[in-house]
């Protein structure tokens, strides 16, 4: 990949927890500007640890990168604070639909704008853009986030991240626990942001079907290491990928017990 097109470069990343438990052992990939890249793998493959390393959040969980490098638009991520990374444009939506549950939907969005020190006028303008992307949030603007549906909470979390005006949006399992129609709607919105506004997106998912449908390329992790990378549409049709790397093994038919 040409150097000038690379926005994020992860090279031979190795990480542990409490200096003893190996979590990553050779993760490497590049993400181009304006690309949607899916990070796939079964539960425990290392997806969440990789994303936390990208935002330099591992030290907060007794984790550490022991070797390798991460560069975001030339910035050394491992030497940059999480807050500075957000200001530089690397913004993450953590797993679990993190919202300020006691704040309204709109107050959650405002908090995203305050995080980048936006002016009152800029925040108001950006909120209207979020409502244009997610009309449901405008309907729920005065509702407490903790009382909204799972899909609305995920939209709020994504909207709050967009208020930071990211250049790279990183999402961890955005489909988790949501109905299929809601998942499709969220991914369509993400692709629209990518195609219309040039937003680069990295999404970690266990739901390989939806991720490969909307991504440009995909990286597959297994046991904390990169095992395969390729065009998303090519990988989408490969049964071996579903079977061996995404935890979707075929289940043999059960044999009824013989009673006698």
Image (cartoon, rainbow, N blue to C red):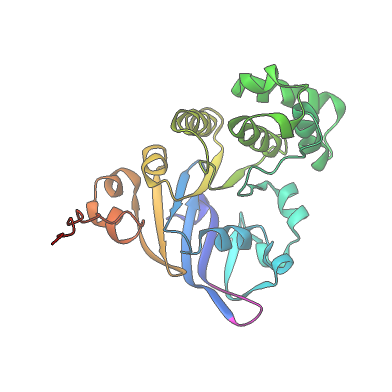
Is residue 37 found inside the magenta-colored segment of the image? no
Q: Is residue 60 above or below residue 18?
A: above
Q: Quick one: quadrant of the C terminus?
A: bottom left
Q: Is residue 40 left or right of residue 176?
A: left
Which contiguous range is marked in magenta?
Answer: 14-20
Q: Nearer the viewer, residue 29 or 153?
A: 153
Task: Give the left or right position of residue 221, taking residue 236 as reference.
Answer: right
Residue 166: x %, y % from top left: 66, 41
Left or right placement of residue 82 versus residue 17 in this view: right
| Residue 25 at x, y percent in the picture | 48, 74
Q: Quadrant of residue 259?
A: bottom left
The location of residue 15, given as percent across then percent down, is 58, 73
Query: Quarter of the image containing the N terminus?
Result: bottom left
Can you tell which quarter of the image residue 141 is in?
top right
- Give the farthest residue toward the front: 260
Compare residues 251 and 9 and report the one nearer the observer: 251
Position of residue 54 relative to residue 214, above or below, is: below
Quick check: 146 left or right of 229? right
Q: Residue at x 68, y 17 (%)?
A: 139
């Amino acid at each position: 990949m040409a150097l000038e097109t690379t926005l994020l470069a992860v090279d031979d990343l190795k990480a542990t927890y409490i200096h003893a438990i190996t979590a990553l052992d050779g993760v490497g990939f590049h993400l181009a500007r304006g690309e949607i890249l899916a990070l796939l793998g079964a539960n425990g493959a290392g997806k969440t640890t990789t994303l936390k390393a990208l935002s330099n959040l591992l030290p907060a969980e007794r984790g550490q990168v022991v070797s390798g490098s991460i560069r975001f638009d030339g910035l050394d991520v491992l030497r940059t604070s999480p807050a500075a990374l957000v200001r530089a444009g690397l913004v993450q939506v953590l797993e679990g639909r993190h919202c300020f549950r006691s704040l309204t939907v709109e107050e959650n969005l405002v908090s995203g704008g305050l995080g980048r020190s936006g002016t009152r006028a800029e925040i108001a303008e950006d909120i209207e853009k979020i409502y244009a992307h997610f009309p449901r949030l405008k309907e729920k603007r005065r509702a407490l986030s903790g009382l909204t549906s799972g899909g609305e909470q995920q939209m709020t979390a994504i909207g709050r991240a967009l208020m930071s005006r990211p250049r790279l949006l990183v999402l961890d399992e955005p489909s988790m626990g949501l109905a299929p129609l809601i998942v499709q709607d969220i991914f369509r919105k993400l692709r629209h942001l990518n195609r219309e506004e040039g937003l680069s997106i990295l999404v970690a998912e266990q739901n390989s079907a939806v991720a490969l449908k909307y991504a440009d390329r995909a990286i597959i992790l297994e046991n904390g290491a990169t095992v395969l990378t390729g065009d998303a549409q090519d990988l989408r049709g490969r049964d071996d990928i579903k079977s061996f790397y995404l935890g979707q093994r075929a289940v043999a038919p059960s044999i009824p017990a013989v009673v006698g």
